[in-house]
Image (spheres, rainbow, N blue to C red):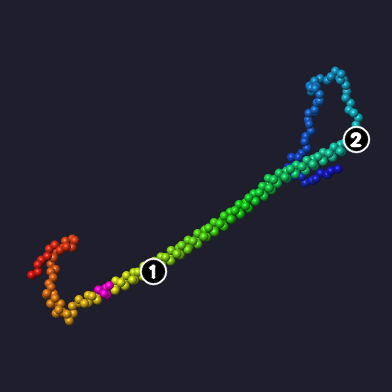
Amino acid sequence: MFQVIGGRSVQAARLLAPRSAVLVEAVRGRKSRNDPVAKSKEGRIKTPPPVDPVEMVVLKERYSEYQLIMRALRLEFKEEVLRKRYEEETGSRAEERARQEAEEHQALMAWNDQENLRLLKLRVLRVQQEAEEAQRKKMEVIMQREQQQQELLKEKEKEILQLQEDIKNFITLENLDQRIEEALDNPKNYNFAIDKEGRVVKQTLLQ
C-alpha cells in the first residue's frame, strides 16, 4: 500500500485536484434517450444483483487506496513537471544570463585594457613630442641670442673700426694749419637744391 507524500504546495494541489465525476450517464445502442420503454419491458422491475457486504467493503477500501495512489502519482508528476519548467525558466536562464554577463564583462575589460594601452602609447608619444618641441624651441632661442650677440659684436667692431678711421680725420692742434690750408685750397659749395630723387637741380657759384 502506497503512502501519500505530504508538503504539497497549495498551487499544485489546486492544479492537481481530482477530476469531477461524469454527470450524464452514457447510453449504449441505437436507442435515443427520449425513446419510450419497449413493450416487452413494460412493467418490468429491475432488481439489482445481490452484493456481498464483505466484498463491497474490500472494494471500497481498494478503490479509496487507488484514488489516493493515483492522486499522489499525479501530484508527483505535476510537481516534477512544474519544477523542471521553473528550473528551465529561472535556473537555466539565470545561468545563461550570468554566463553572458560574465563574457560581456570579460570582453569589456579586455577592450578597456587595450584602450588604456593605446591611450598610454599616445600619451607617451605626445609627451616625447612636446619635450622635443620644447628642446628645439630652447635651442632656437639660444641660437637666436647667440646670433644677436654675434651681430651686436660685429656692429661694435664696425663702429670701432669706423671710429678708428674717423680718428685719422680728426682736427688736432698738430694738423690744424694743414687742414686750414686744405680747406682753402679745396673749397666746397653747399648752397644747392635737390629734387625728390635726391638729384642736384640748382647750385650757386662760389664767389
Q: Main secondary structure of the magenta part?
A: helix
Image: 34 above or below 53: above
Query: Crowding at label 2, few (<14), some or many (≥20) Cα neighbours within 10 Å?
Result: few
Residue 121's disc number: none
Depth check, front residue: 192 or 162: 162
Q: Name the residue at the left extreme.
A: 207
Depth check, front residue: 146 or 69: 146
Q: Position of residue 189 (x, y in %)?
A: 12, 69
Q: Residue at the location (12% across, 67% down)? A: 191
On the image, which quarter does residue 173 sit in? Answer: bottom left
Reading the image, the residue beneath label 1 is 142
Q: Position of residue 122 (x, y in %)?
A: 50, 59
Q: Residue at the location (78% across, 34% down)? A: 20
Image: 18 above or below 135: above
Reading the image, the residue beneath label 2 is 55
Image: 13 above or below 44: below
Q: Residue at the location (9% across, 69% down)? A: 206
Which region of the structure is painted magenta? Answer: 158-162
